Amino acid sequence: DTEVTQTPKHLVMGMTNKKSLKCEQHMGHRAMYWYKQKAKKPPELMFVYSYEKLSINESVPSRFSPECPNSSLLNLHLHALQPEDSALYLCASSHSQGNEQFFGPGTRLTVL
Amino acid sequence: EDQVTQSPEALRLQEGESSSLNCSYTVSGLRGLFWYRQDPGKGPEFLFTLYSAGEEKEKERLKATLTKKESFLHITAPKPEDSATYLCAVRRMDSSYKLIFGSGTRLLVRP
């Protein structure tokens, strides 16, 4: 298995909702990443997990809360989001923090 | 300041018309340069990693090359299915996790 999977593919939520994005990989990668991508822009790094521990938080607002339950799973919990948070949320993984990253298909999030 | 600049922003080619995309970078100590392909609404697809000047990688109609200041993605005899946005990213020697992305080149190949 050489892919990163993400669910759901699309998500529409109100500003008072709580939702979660899920990411899974079975490539034995020990680094996992969350990115945010706006239209016609490159991906922006949000969080990095290394060996299931939060390694990097790129000054992301607390309404985004990451979680890494085990080496194959990565979640992103969403609460009280703003319309400007609408974007494509991408998960990626790599063998270690220094190698090429493999991206999932993304979750298209719309905040109303 | 670290910077990655891709040109052109957009490129339209006829099927079979070969061309090159450019990625110029300024970074203090290059650990690796990465090329990705991204289709609309999808995640980036990894294409190549280049580590040192003079290195070349090939995959089907694509060939990536690297110098000390820039990388080129050569597309030979492109087909309409090669239409996508091509992203270049670099990783600094002292930053093992963060990719610095360029803004991408949107390629359209007409039949």
Image: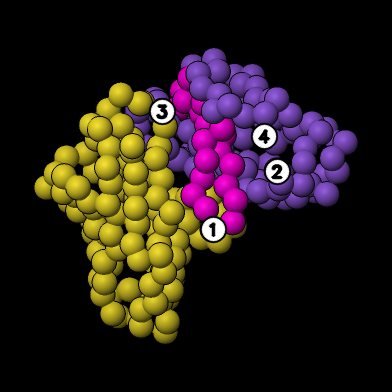
Chain colours: A purple, B yellow
Residue type marked 3: Tyr
Q: Secondary structure at mark 2?
A: helix
Asked if residue A79 shows in the view, the reply is yes
Q: Chain of mark 1?
A: A
Residue type marked 4: Lys
- Disc 3 marks which residue? B97
Q: Chain of mark 4?
A: A
Of residues A64 and A11, the one drawn nearer to the viewer in this rendering: A64
Q: Mark 1 and mark 2 in contact (Cβ < 8 Å)?
A: no
Query: Which residue is rendered at x = 81% and y = 33% of the image?
Result: A80
Q: Residue A65 in the image: x percent, y percent?
A: 69, 25
| Discs 3 and 1 carry the same chain letter | no
- Disc 2 marks which residue? A85
Q: Nearer the viewer, mark 4 or mark 1?
A: 1
- Is A51 left, or right, of A83 in this rendering? left
- Disc 4 marks which residue? A22
Q: Mark 4 and mark 3 in contact (Cβ < 8 Å)?
A: no
Determine the CA span between mark 2 and mark 3: 23 Å
- Disc 1 marks which residue? A40
How many circles with numbers are drawn on the protein?
4
- Is A70 left, or right, of B67 in this rendering? right
Determine the CA span between mark 4 and mark 2: 17 Å
Figure check: B27 above or below B10: above
Q: Main secondary structure of the magenta part?
A: strand
Q: Nearer the viewer, mark 3 or mark 4?
A: 3
Mark 4 vs 2, N-terminal side = 4
